[in-house]
Amino acid sequence: MGAADMTDPSGEPSPVWRQGIALSVLSGVGFYLLLQALSLRQVGSFEHMLDDVYIHLAMATEIARGGYGVNPGEPASAASSLLYPLLLTPFAGSDLQRYLPVLWNLVGVTAASALWGAFVGRAVPRGPRTLLTAILLAAFGPLALHLGGIGFVGMEHALQIAATMAVLYGLAVFVQQGRLSWLLIAGIVIGPMLRVENVGVSGMACAILLFNGRPAVAVLAGAAALAPLAGFGWFLTTLGLDPVPNSLQTKFAGGGGMFEDRPLFLRLLLFLHNLGHVIGGVMLGLACLWTLAGLAIAPLRRRPLVWIWISLVAVGVAHLIMGRVGELYRYEVYAVGWMVGLSILLLGPLMARPGAAGSGSRAGAVLLMIAGMLYYSGSIISYGPLAARTIHLQHSQMARFAQDVLKAPVAVNDLGRVVWRNPAYVLDLWGLASAEALGIRRASPPPGWAAPLAERHGVEVAMIYENWLGEAMDPAWVRLGVLALTPQTLPDGTQAVRFAGASDDKVVFLAIDPADVPRLAGLLTGFAAELPAGAEFRFAPGIAEQALPAQD
Protein backbone atom coordinates (compact mmCIF):
# COMPACT_ATOMS: atom_id res chain seq x y z
CA MET A 1 0.00 0.00 0.00
CA GLY A 2 2.03 2.97 -1.26
CA ALA A 3 1.40 6.35 -2.79
CA ALA A 4 0.67 4.89 -6.19
CA ASP A 5 -2.00 2.60 -4.75
CA MET A 6 -4.08 5.45 -3.40
CA THR A 7 -5.64 6.53 -6.71
CA ASP A 8 -5.95 5.24 -10.24
CA PRO A 9 -2.96 5.46 -12.62
CA SER A 10 -4.20 8.73 -14.11
CA GLY A 11 -4.11 10.34 -10.70
CA GLU A 12 -7.63 11.63 -11.19
CA PRO A 13 -10.18 11.77 -8.39
CA SER A 14 -13.28 9.60 -8.23
CA PRO A 15 -15.97 10.26 -10.86
CA VAL A 16 -18.31 11.32 -8.04
CA TRP A 17 -15.95 14.19 -7.18
CA ARG A 18 -18.31 17.00 -8.25
CA GLN A 19 -21.39 15.23 -6.94
CA GLY A 20 -19.56 14.65 -3.65
CA ILE A 21 -18.81 18.35 -3.31
CA ALA A 22 -22.45 19.21 -3.99
CA LEU A 23 -23.68 16.62 -1.47
CA SER A 24 -21.28 17.86 1.19
CA VAL A 25 -22.20 21.51 0.71
CA LEU A 26 -25.89 20.69 0.75
CA SER A 27 -25.44 18.69 3.95
CA GLY A 28 -23.28 21.19 5.84
CA VAL A 29 -24.92 24.43 4.75
CA GLY A 30 -28.41 22.94 4.97
CA PHE A 31 -27.87 21.92 8.58
CA TYR A 32 -26.38 25.31 9.44
CA LEU A 33 -29.40 27.11 7.99
CA LEU A 34 -31.75 24.70 9.79
CA LEU A 35 -30.15 25.60 13.12
CA GLN A 36 -30.55 29.31 12.37
CA ALA A 37 -34.23 28.77 11.53
CA LEU A 38 -34.86 26.79 14.72
CA SER A 39 -33.14 29.51 16.73
CA LEU A 40 -35.30 32.24 15.19
CA ARG A 41 -38.38 30.20 16.00
CA GLN A 42 -37.48 29.62 19.63
CA VAL A 43 -36.07 33.07 20.43
CA GLY A 44 -38.45 35.13 18.32
CA SER A 45 -35.58 37.25 16.99
CA PHE A 46 -31.98 36.78 15.90
CA GLU A 47 -29.47 35.89 18.59
CA HIS A 48 -26.10 34.16 18.75
CA MET A 49 -25.94 30.99 20.84
CA LEU A 50 -22.66 31.96 22.51
CA ASP A 51 -21.82 35.13 24.42
CA ASP A 52 -18.18 34.92 23.29
CA VAL A 53 -19.19 36.06 19.80
CA TYR A 54 -19.84 39.52 21.23
CA ILE A 55 -16.34 39.64 22.73
CA HIS A 56 -14.93 39.40 19.22
CA LEU A 57 -17.40 42.01 17.99
CA ALA A 58 -16.33 44.35 20.80
CA MET A 59 -12.66 43.69 20.00
CA ALA A 60 -13.36 44.44 16.33
CA THR A 61 -15.07 47.71 17.27
CA GLU A 62 -12.06 48.82 19.30
CA ILE A 63 -9.69 47.79 16.50
CA ALA A 64 -11.69 49.92 14.08
CA ARG A 65 -11.18 52.85 16.49
CA GLY A 66 -7.43 52.28 16.47
CA GLY A 67 -7.14 50.43 19.78
CA TYR A 68 -6.95 46.80 20.85
CA GLY A 69 -9.26 45.59 23.61
CA VAL A 70 -12.91 46.01 24.57
CA ASN A 71 -12.79 49.23 26.61
CA PRO A 72 -11.50 52.40 24.89
CA GLY A 73 -7.96 53.24 25.92
CA GLU A 74 -7.37 49.97 27.81
CA PRO A 75 -5.38 47.35 25.87
CA ALA A 76 -6.61 43.80 26.36
CA SER A 77 -6.19 40.45 24.58
CA ALA A 78 -9.68 39.06 25.02
CA ALA A 79 -9.72 37.14 21.71
CA SER A 80 -7.87 33.88 21.06
CA SER A 81 -7.83 34.41 17.31
CA LEU A 82 -5.45 36.78 15.57
CA LEU A 83 -7.52 37.00 12.38
CA TYR A 84 -11.19 36.67 13.37
CA PRO A 85 -11.65 40.07 15.08
CA LEU A 86 -10.13 41.72 12.00
CA LEU A 87 -12.77 40.05 9.83
CA LEU A 88 -15.48 41.59 12.02
CA THR A 89 -14.32 45.22 11.74
CA PRO A 90 -16.68 46.25 8.88
CA PHE A 91 -19.74 48.14 10.15
CA ALA A 92 -18.05 48.38 13.58
CA GLY A 93 -20.35 49.76 16.25
CA SER A 94 -23.53 49.32 14.21
CA ASP A 95 -26.22 46.69 14.60
CA LEU A 96 -25.28 45.37 11.15
CA GLN A 97 -21.92 44.26 12.56
CA ARG A 98 -23.79 41.73 14.68
CA TYR A 99 -24.57 39.67 11.56
CA LEU A 100 -20.99 39.45 10.27
CA PRO A 101 -20.30 36.24 12.24
CA VAL A 102 -23.24 34.67 10.39
CA LEU A 103 -21.72 35.64 7.05
CA TRP A 104 -18.21 34.44 7.89
CA ASN A 105 -19.50 31.19 9.34
CA LEU A 106 -21.58 30.59 6.23
CA VAL A 107 -18.36 31.06 4.25
CA GLY A 108 -16.51 28.70 6.59
CA VAL A 109 -19.19 25.99 6.54
CA THR A 110 -19.47 26.17 2.74
CA ALA A 111 -15.70 26.01 2.22
CA ALA A 112 -15.16 23.24 4.78
CA SER A 113 -18.01 21.15 3.35
CA ALA A 114 -16.85 21.62 -0.25
CA LEU A 115 -13.29 20.70 0.66
CA TRP A 116 -14.48 17.63 2.52
CA GLY A 117 -16.40 16.50 -0.57
CA ALA A 118 -13.34 17.10 -2.73
CA PHE A 119 -11.14 15.23 -0.25
CA VAL A 120 -13.45 12.20 -0.23
CA GLY A 121 -13.35 12.19 -4.03
CA ARG A 122 -9.57 11.75 -3.84
CA ALA A 123 -9.18 9.64 -0.70
CA VAL A 124 -11.70 6.97 -1.75
CA PRO A 125 -10.49 5.21 -4.93
CA ARG A 126 -12.82 4.92 -7.91
CA GLY A 127 -14.58 1.65 -8.57
CA PRO A 128 -17.98 -0.02 -8.22
CA ARG A 129 -17.18 -1.27 -4.72
CA THR A 130 -16.41 2.19 -3.39
CA LEU A 131 -19.01 4.32 -5.20
CA LEU A 132 -21.68 4.09 -2.51
CA THR A 133 -19.09 4.54 0.24
CA ALA A 134 -17.82 7.76 -1.37
CA ILE A 135 -21.36 9.11 -1.69
CA LEU A 136 -22.22 8.33 1.94
CA LEU A 137 -18.96 9.76 3.28
CA ALA A 138 -19.50 12.97 1.31
CA ALA A 139 -23.10 13.31 2.47
CA PHE A 140 -22.65 12.37 6.14
CA GLY A 141 -19.23 13.94 6.67
CA PRO A 142 -20.28 17.55 7.34
CA LEU A 143 -22.78 16.32 9.94
CA ALA A 144 -20.43 13.76 11.45
CA LEU A 145 -17.55 16.23 11.71
CA HIS A 146 -19.68 19.05 13.17
CA LEU A 147 -19.09 21.36 10.19
CA GLY A 148 -22.60 22.84 10.05
CA GLY A 149 -23.05 22.82 13.82
CA ILE A 150 -19.75 24.55 14.52
CA GLY A 151 -20.79 27.37 12.19
CA PHE A 152 -23.88 27.98 14.33
CA VAL A 153 -21.62 28.57 17.35
CA GLY A 154 -20.66 31.83 15.61
CA MET A 155 -16.93 31.87 16.34
CA GLU A 156 -13.90 31.33 14.11
CA HIS A 157 -14.01 27.53 14.29
CA ALA A 158 -15.82 27.01 10.96
CA LEU A 159 -13.05 28.93 9.19
CA GLN A 160 -10.48 26.97 11.21
CA ILE A 161 -11.89 23.63 10.10
CA ALA A 162 -12.02 24.93 6.52
CA ALA A 163 -8.27 25.59 6.74
CA THR A 164 -7.79 22.08 8.15
CA MET A 165 -9.80 20.59 5.28
CA ALA A 166 -7.65 22.54 2.81
CA VAL A 167 -4.55 20.89 4.31
CA LEU A 168 -6.20 17.46 4.17
CA TYR A 169 -7.12 17.86 0.53
CA GLY A 170 -3.67 19.18 -0.32
CA LEU A 171 -2.02 16.23 1.42
CA ALA A 172 -4.20 13.78 -0.52
CA VAL A 173 -3.03 15.37 -3.77
CA PHE A 174 0.60 15.34 -2.60
CA VAL A 175 0.59 11.72 -1.40
CA GLN A 176 -1.16 10.45 -4.51
CA GLN A 177 0.56 12.50 -7.19
CA GLY A 178 3.54 14.19 -5.56
CA ARG A 179 2.04 17.52 -6.61
CA LEU A 180 1.74 20.61 -4.41
CA SER A 181 -1.70 22.21 -4.26
CA TRP A 182 -2.08 25.88 -3.42
CA LEU A 183 -4.80 24.81 -0.97
CA LEU A 184 -2.21 22.89 1.05
CA ILE A 185 0.02 25.95 1.43
CA ALA A 186 -2.94 28.25 2.12
CA GLY A 187 -4.27 25.93 4.84
CA ILE A 188 -0.84 25.62 6.47
CA VAL A 189 -0.37 29.40 6.60
CA ILE A 190 -3.89 30.60 7.42
CA GLY A 191 -4.93 27.94 9.97
CA PRO A 192 -2.80 29.15 12.91
CA MET A 193 -3.94 32.74 12.35
CA LEU A 194 -7.50 31.58 12.92
CA ARG A 195 -6.78 29.35 15.94
CA VAL A 196 -3.38 28.68 17.48
CA GLU A 197 -4.24 24.97 17.85
CA ASN A 198 -3.78 24.63 14.10
CA VAL A 199 -0.03 24.97 14.64
CA GLY A 200 -0.16 21.20 15.16
CA VAL A 201 -1.87 20.58 11.82
CA SER A 202 0.43 22.98 9.99
CA GLY A 203 3.52 21.60 11.70
CA MET A 204 2.74 18.00 10.81
CA ALA A 205 1.88 18.94 7.23
CA CYS A 206 5.27 20.64 6.98
CA ALA A 207 6.92 17.52 8.41
CA ILE A 208 5.28 15.42 5.68
CA LEU A 209 6.65 17.80 3.05
CA LEU A 210 10.07 17.96 4.73
CA PHE A 211 10.62 14.21 4.78
CA ASN A 212 9.15 13.55 1.36
CA GLY A 213 11.34 15.59 -0.90
CA ARG A 214 10.04 19.15 -0.40
CA PRO A 215 12.26 20.59 2.36
CA ALA A 216 12.37 24.15 0.98
CA VAL A 217 8.59 24.35 0.71
CA ALA A 218 8.24 22.87 4.20
CA VAL A 219 10.55 25.43 5.77
CA LEU A 220 9.03 28.39 3.95
CA ALA A 221 5.44 27.33 4.67
CA GLY A 222 6.26 26.67 8.33
CA ALA A 223 7.93 30.06 8.68
CA ALA A 224 4.98 31.76 7.00
CA ALA A 225 2.61 30.02 9.45
CA LEU A 226 4.60 30.97 12.56
CA ALA A 227 5.61 34.51 11.60
CA PRO A 228 2.13 36.06 12.13
CA LEU A 229 1.85 34.43 15.57
CA ALA A 230 5.28 35.71 16.56
CA GLY A 231 4.36 39.16 15.28
CA PHE A 232 1.08 39.04 17.18
CA GLY A 233 2.86 38.13 20.41
CA TRP A 234 5.33 40.98 19.87
CA PHE A 235 2.46 43.38 19.19
CA LEU A 236 0.80 42.41 22.48
CA THR A 237 4.02 43.08 24.39
CA THR A 238 4.21 46.58 22.86
CA LEU A 239 0.83 47.21 24.53
CA GLY A 240 2.18 46.04 27.88
CA LEU A 241 0.37 42.69 27.64
CA ASP A 242 1.53 39.11 27.91
CA PRO A 243 2.43 37.66 24.47
CA VAL A 244 -0.07 34.85 25.10
CA PRO A 245 -3.66 36.22 24.93
CA ASN A 246 -5.62 36.23 28.18
CA SER A 247 -8.33 34.13 26.55
CA LEU A 248 -5.82 31.34 25.92
CA GLN A 249 -4.41 31.61 29.43
CA THR A 250 -7.83 31.25 31.03
CA LYS A 251 -8.95 28.38 28.80
CA PHE A 252 -5.82 26.33 28.25
CA ALA A 253 -3.38 27.25 31.02
CA GLY A 254 -5.49 26.04 33.88
CA GLY A 255 -7.20 29.27 34.74
CA GLY A 256 -5.90 29.47 38.26
CA GLY A 257 -6.37 27.53 41.46
CA MET A 258 -4.33 25.29 43.71
CA PHE A 259 -2.39 23.61 40.83
CA GLU A 260 -1.28 26.82 39.11
CA ASP A 261 2.38 26.16 39.93
CA ARG A 262 2.22 22.51 38.80
CA PRO A 263 1.77 22.69 35.00
CA LEU A 264 2.50 19.00 34.37
CA PHE A 265 -0.16 17.98 36.86
CA LEU A 266 -2.57 20.43 35.23
CA ARG A 267 -1.90 18.78 31.86
CA LEU A 268 -2.67 15.38 33.39
CA LEU A 269 -5.92 16.68 34.87
CA LEU A 270 -6.90 18.19 31.53
CA PHE A 271 -6.07 14.95 29.72
CA LEU A 272 -8.28 12.96 32.12
CA HIS A 273 -11.04 15.55 31.83
CA ASN A 274 -10.94 15.27 28.03
CA LEU A 275 -11.17 11.50 28.21
CA GLY A 276 -14.36 11.93 30.23
CA HIS A 277 -16.07 13.05 27.01
CA VAL A 278 -17.18 10.52 24.41
CA ILE A 279 -15.28 12.38 21.69
CA GLY A 280 -12.11 12.40 23.80
CA GLY A 281 -12.35 8.64 24.13
CA VAL A 282 -12.88 8.25 20.39
CA MET A 283 -9.83 10.42 19.68
CA LEU A 284 -7.64 8.35 21.99
CA GLY A 285 -9.06 5.14 20.51
CA LEU A 286 -8.20 6.25 16.96
CA ALA A 287 -4.72 7.27 18.07
CA CYS A 288 -4.09 3.90 19.74
CA LEU A 289 -5.56 1.97 16.80
CA TRP A 290 -3.31 3.66 14.26
CA THR A 291 -0.28 3.40 16.51
CA LEU A 292 -0.75 -0.37 16.66
CA ALA A 293 -1.49 -0.50 12.92
CA GLY A 294 1.66 1.44 12.15
CA LEU A 295 3.76 -0.94 14.23
CA ALA A 296 2.14 -4.04 12.76
CA ILE A 297 1.70 -3.19 9.06
CA ALA A 298 4.97 -2.73 7.19
CA PRO A 299 3.67 -0.53 4.31
CA LEU A 300 2.53 2.07 6.85
CA ARG A 301 6.13 2.46 7.97
CA ARG A 302 7.28 3.44 4.49
CA ARG A 303 7.22 6.93 3.08
CA PRO A 304 5.00 8.82 2.52
CA LEU A 305 2.46 6.86 4.58
CA VAL A 306 4.59 6.70 7.72
CA TRP A 307 4.26 10.46 8.19
CA ILE A 308 0.52 10.33 7.55
CA TRP A 309 -0.18 7.98 10.44
CA ILE A 310 2.37 9.72 12.68
CA SER A 311 0.61 13.04 11.97
CA LEU A 312 -2.79 11.50 12.67
CA VAL A 313 -1.68 10.24 16.08
CA ALA A 314 0.43 13.28 17.02
CA VAL A 315 -2.27 15.92 16.45
CA GLY A 316 -4.92 13.90 18.28
CA VAL A 317 -2.80 13.15 21.35
CA ALA A 318 -1.40 16.69 21.48
CA HIS A 319 -4.91 18.12 21.59
CA LEU A 320 -5.99 15.75 24.35
CA ILE A 321 -3.03 16.96 26.43
CA MET A 322 -2.93 20.65 25.55
CA GLY A 323 -6.46 21.48 24.37
CA ARG A 324 -10.01 20.92 25.45
CA VAL A 325 -12.82 18.59 24.46
CA GLY A 326 -16.43 19.59 24.95
CA GLU A 327 -17.86 23.07 25.56
CA LEU A 328 -20.07 22.95 22.45
CA TYR A 329 -17.42 20.63 20.93
CA ARG A 330 -15.81 23.65 19.30
CA TYR A 331 -12.22 23.22 20.48
CA GLU A 332 -11.50 19.69 19.24
CA VAL A 333 -13.41 19.82 15.93
CA TYR A 334 -10.29 20.54 13.86
CA ALA A 335 -8.43 17.57 15.44
CA VAL A 336 -11.37 15.22 14.92
CA GLY A 337 -11.64 16.26 11.27
CA TRP A 338 -7.90 15.77 10.86
CA MET A 339 -7.88 12.31 12.44
CA VAL A 340 -10.95 11.05 10.60
CA GLY A 341 -9.74 12.48 7.29
CA LEU A 342 -6.30 10.91 7.52
CA SER A 343 -7.90 7.62 8.61
CA ILE A 344 -9.96 7.58 5.42
CA LEU A 345 -6.87 8.49 3.37
CA LEU A 346 -4.99 5.54 4.85
CA LEU A 347 -7.95 3.17 4.45
CA GLY A 348 -8.66 4.24 0.86
CA PRO A 349 -6.67 1.52 -0.91
CA LEU A 350 -8.16 -1.13 1.37
CA MET A 351 -11.69 0.00 0.53
CA ALA A 352 -11.22 -0.93 -3.13
CA ARG A 353 -10.23 -4.51 -2.39
CA PRO A 354 -12.63 -7.47 -2.57
CA GLY A 355 -13.35 -9.67 0.39
CA ALA A 356 -13.80 -9.08 4.08
CA ALA A 357 -10.99 -6.55 4.41
CA GLY A 358 -12.46 -4.26 1.78
CA SER A 359 -16.06 -4.54 2.90
CA GLY A 360 -15.05 -4.16 6.55
CA SER A 361 -13.09 -0.97 5.91
CA ARG A 362 -15.93 0.51 3.86
CA ALA A 363 -18.52 -0.36 6.49
CA GLY A 364 -16.29 0.91 9.30
CA ALA A 365 -15.81 4.30 7.64
CA VAL A 366 -19.53 4.73 7.00
CA LEU A 367 -20.47 3.63 10.53
CA LEU A 368 -17.97 6.12 11.96
CA MET A 369 -19.71 8.85 9.95
CA ILE A 370 -23.15 7.78 11.14
CA ALA A 371 -22.05 7.67 14.78
CA GLY A 372 -20.47 11.11 14.54
CA MET A 373 -23.57 12.49 12.84
CA LEU A 374 -25.87 11.21 15.56
CA TYR A 375 -23.61 12.48 18.35
CA TYR A 376 -22.55 15.91 17.09
CA SER A 377 -25.64 16.89 15.14
CA GLY A 378 -28.00 15.43 17.70
CA SER A 379 -26.32 17.42 20.46
CA ILE A 380 -26.23 20.78 18.71
CA ILE A 381 -29.78 20.60 17.34
CA SER A 382 -31.20 19.93 20.81
CA TYR A 383 -28.93 22.41 22.61
CA GLY A 384 -28.01 25.20 20.20
CA PRO A 385 -31.34 27.00 19.64
CA LEU A 386 -32.07 26.81 23.38
CA ALA A 387 -28.67 28.33 24.10
CA ALA A 388 -29.52 31.25 21.79
CA ARG A 389 -32.71 31.69 23.78
CA THR A 390 -30.69 31.79 27.01
CA ILE A 391 -28.36 34.46 25.61
CA HIS A 392 -31.44 36.52 24.77
CA LEU A 393 -33.00 36.06 28.20
CA GLN A 394 -29.88 36.50 30.31
CA HIS A 395 -26.95 38.21 28.59
CA SER A 396 -29.00 40.50 26.38
CA GLN A 397 -31.06 41.60 29.37
CA MET A 398 -27.90 42.32 31.36
CA ALA A 399 -26.72 44.40 28.41
CA ARG A 400 -30.05 46.25 28.31
CA PHE A 401 -29.76 47.11 31.98
CA ALA A 402 -26.14 48.25 31.70
CA GLN A 403 -26.48 50.23 28.49
CA ASP A 404 -30.08 51.53 28.43
CA VAL A 405 -31.04 51.71 32.11
CA LEU A 406 -27.96 52.21 34.30
CA LYS A 407 -25.67 53.88 31.73
CA ALA A 408 -22.68 53.58 34.07
CA PRO A 409 -19.70 51.24 34.58
CA VAL A 410 -20.48 47.66 35.60
CA ALA A 411 -18.51 44.55 36.58
CA VAL A 412 -19.26 41.15 35.04
CA ASN A 413 -17.80 37.67 34.70
CA ASP A 414 -19.38 36.94 31.29
CA LEU A 415 -18.12 39.75 29.14
CA GLY A 416 -19.47 39.70 25.60
CA ARG A 417 -23.00 41.00 25.19
CA VAL A 418 -22.68 43.56 27.97
CA VAL A 419 -19.55 45.19 26.53
CA TRP A 420 -20.47 45.26 22.83
CA ARG A 421 -21.68 48.77 21.85
CA ASN A 422 -21.44 49.88 25.48
CA PRO A 423 -19.95 53.40 25.84
CA ALA A 424 -19.42 52.90 29.60
CA TYR A 425 -16.57 50.92 31.15
CA VAL A 426 -17.07 47.18 31.71
CA LEU A 427 -14.82 45.50 34.28
CA ASP A 428 -14.18 41.86 33.38
CA LEU A 429 -13.62 40.07 36.68
CA TRP A 430 -12.92 36.74 34.96
CA GLY A 431 -9.92 38.27 33.27
CA LEU A 432 -10.39 37.86 29.51
CA ALA A 433 -10.23 41.63 29.06
CA SER A 434 -8.35 42.50 32.23
CA ALA A 435 -4.82 41.26 32.77
CA GLU A 436 -4.97 42.65 36.30
CA ALA A 437 -8.11 40.71 37.21
CA LEU A 438 -6.72 37.55 35.63
CA GLY A 439 -3.48 37.85 37.58
CA ILE A 440 -5.31 38.40 40.87
CA ARG A 441 -7.76 35.56 40.28
CA ARG A 442 -5.02 33.07 39.38
CA ALA A 443 -3.06 33.90 42.54
CA SER A 444 -5.68 32.42 44.92
CA PRO A 445 -6.68 35.86 46.29
CA PRO A 446 -8.48 36.57 49.57
CA PRO A 447 -12.26 37.08 49.72
CA GLY A 448 -13.47 40.45 48.47
CA TRP A 449 -10.56 40.89 46.07
CA ALA A 450 -12.71 42.60 43.42
CA ALA A 451 -13.52 45.63 45.61
CA PRO A 452 -10.39 47.73 44.78
CA LEU A 453 -10.82 47.07 41.05
CA ALA A 454 -14.47 48.08 41.14
CA GLU A 455 -13.70 51.25 43.08
CA ARG A 456 -10.86 52.22 40.74
CA HIS A 457 -13.06 51.95 37.65
CA GLY A 458 -16.13 53.63 39.10
CA VAL A 459 -18.28 50.50 38.94
CA GLU A 460 -21.80 50.97 40.28
CA VAL A 461 -23.25 47.46 39.83
CA ALA A 462 -21.68 44.00 39.65
CA MET A 463 -23.56 41.30 37.70
CA ILE A 464 -21.94 37.92 38.31
CA TYR A 465 -22.49 34.20 38.66
CA GLU A 466 -22.13 33.54 42.35
CA ASN A 467 -20.76 30.04 41.74
CA TRP A 468 -17.98 31.57 39.61
CA LEU A 469 -16.92 34.60 41.60
CA GLY A 470 -18.70 34.50 44.92
CA GLU A 471 -15.44 35.02 46.83
CA ALA A 472 -14.64 38.11 44.76
CA MET A 473 -17.58 39.99 46.27
CA ASP A 474 -16.86 42.54 48.97
CA PRO A 475 -19.01 41.98 52.09
CA ALA A 476 -19.88 45.68 51.94
CA TRP A 477 -21.58 45.28 48.57
CA VAL A 478 -25.37 45.14 48.82
CA ARG A 479 -27.27 42.29 47.17
CA LEU A 480 -29.99 43.84 45.03
CA GLY A 481 -31.47 40.61 43.68
CA VAL A 482 -31.05 38.04 40.92
CA LEU A 483 -31.91 37.89 37.26
CA ALA A 484 -33.31 34.36 36.97
CA LEU A 485 -34.33 32.14 34.08
CA THR A 486 -37.74 30.57 34.53
CA PRO A 487 -39.32 27.47 32.95
CA GLN A 488 -41.14 28.26 29.74
CA THR A 489 -43.06 26.37 27.07
CA LEU A 490 -41.57 27.06 23.66
CA PRO A 491 -43.55 27.66 20.44
CA ASP A 492 -43.05 24.01 19.45
CA GLY A 493 -44.67 22.89 22.69
CA THR A 494 -41.52 21.65 24.41
CA GLN A 495 -40.30 22.75 27.83
CA ALA A 496 -37.17 24.92 27.69
CA VAL A 497 -33.96 23.63 29.23
CA ARG A 498 -33.08 26.26 31.79
CA PHE A 499 -29.32 25.96 31.75
CA ALA A 500 -28.71 25.67 27.99
CA GLY A 501 -26.04 28.23 27.10
CA ALA A 502 -25.47 29.54 30.63
CA SER A 503 -23.16 28.47 33.43
CA ASP A 504 -25.87 29.41 35.93
CA ASP A 505 -29.54 30.26 35.63
CA LYS A 506 -29.16 33.12 38.12
CA VAL A 507 -27.10 36.30 37.83
CA VAL A 508 -26.58 38.17 41.10
CA PHE A 509 -26.85 41.99 40.96
CA LEU A 510 -24.90 43.87 43.64
CA ALA A 511 -24.62 47.55 44.49
CA ILE A 512 -20.99 48.56 45.05
CA ASP A 513 -21.92 51.62 47.15
CA PRO A 514 -24.73 51.07 49.71
CA ALA A 515 -25.76 54.70 49.28
CA ASP A 516 -26.82 53.93 45.70
CA VAL A 517 -29.31 51.23 46.69
CA PRO A 518 -32.52 53.33 46.56
CA ARG A 519 -31.68 54.74 43.12
CA LEU A 520 -30.62 51.34 41.76
CA ALA A 521 -33.74 49.67 43.18
CA GLY A 522 -35.84 52.21 41.30
CA LEU A 523 -34.00 51.52 38.07
CA LEU A 524 -34.37 47.78 38.55
CA THR A 525 -38.11 48.12 39.10
CA GLY A 526 -38.55 49.54 35.62
CA PHE A 527 -36.06 47.08 34.16
CA ALA A 528 -37.87 44.09 35.72
CA ALA A 529 -41.21 45.21 34.28
CA GLU A 530 -39.87 44.96 30.73
CA LEU A 531 -38.21 41.55 30.94
CA PRO A 532 -39.37 39.02 28.33
CA ALA A 533 -41.20 35.84 29.26
CA GLY A 534 -38.70 33.31 30.53
CA ALA A 535 -36.73 35.75 32.71
CA GLU A 536 -37.60 37.57 35.91
CA PHE A 537 -35.85 39.78 38.44
CA ARG A 538 -36.24 38.70 42.05
CA PHE A 539 -35.43 41.47 44.51
CA ALA A 540 -33.48 40.68 47.65
CA PRO A 541 -35.50 41.11 50.87
CA GLY A 542 -36.18 44.76 51.68
CA ILE A 543 -34.64 46.16 48.47
CA ALA A 544 -37.81 46.82 46.46
CA GLU A 545 -39.25 48.85 49.34
CA GLN A 546 -36.32 51.29 49.11
CA ALA A 547 -36.89 52.06 45.43
CA LEU A 548 -36.91 55.71 44.42
CA PRO A 549 -39.04 56.80 41.46
CA ALA A 550 -37.07 56.54 38.20
CA GLN A 551 -35.81 59.89 36.89
CA ASP A 552 -36.23 60.83 33.23
Image (cartoon, rainbow, N blue to C red):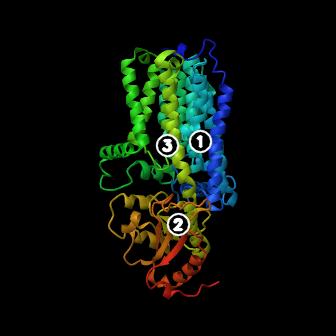
Q: What residue is drawn where x is 36% and y is 18%?
A: 296
User: Label 2 to label 3, Cα distance in Å?
Assistant: 38 Å
Between 23 and 443, the one lying in front of the other is 23
Q: Do the residues labelled 2 and 1 touch (CB within 8 Å)?
A: no
The amino acid sitting under disc 3 is Tyr
Residue position marked by numbered label 2 in the rendering: 426
| Mark 3 secondary-structure assignment | helix
- Decide which of tag 2 and tag 3 comes sooner along the chain: 3
| Mark 2 secondary-structure assignment | strand
Is 102 displayed left or right of 416 in the figure? right
Between 67 and 337, the one lying in front of the other is 337
- Decide which of tag 2 and tag 1 comes sooner along the chain: 1
Q: Nearer the viewer, mark 3 or mark 1?
A: 3
Vertical placement of 205 versus 157: above or below? above
Residue position marked by numbered label 3 in the rendering: 375
Q: Which of marks 2 and 1 is in front?
A: 1
The amino acid sitting under disc 1 is Leu
| Mark 1 secondary-structure assignment | helix
Residue 20 in percent (x, y) is at 65, 29
Is residue 449 in view? no
User: Label 3 to label 1, Cα distance in Å?
Assistant: 22 Å
Number of numbered markers: 3
Residue position marked by numbered label 1 in the rendering: 159
Task: Classify 10 Å Cα crowding around label 2: few (below 14), some (14-19), many (20 and above).
Answer: many
The amino acid sitting under disc 2 is Val
Task: Look at the image and tell me in which quarter the C terminus lies.
Answer: bottom right
Vertical placement of 350 versus 272: above or below? above
Vertical placement of 116 versus 174: above or below? below
Is residue 301 in view? yes
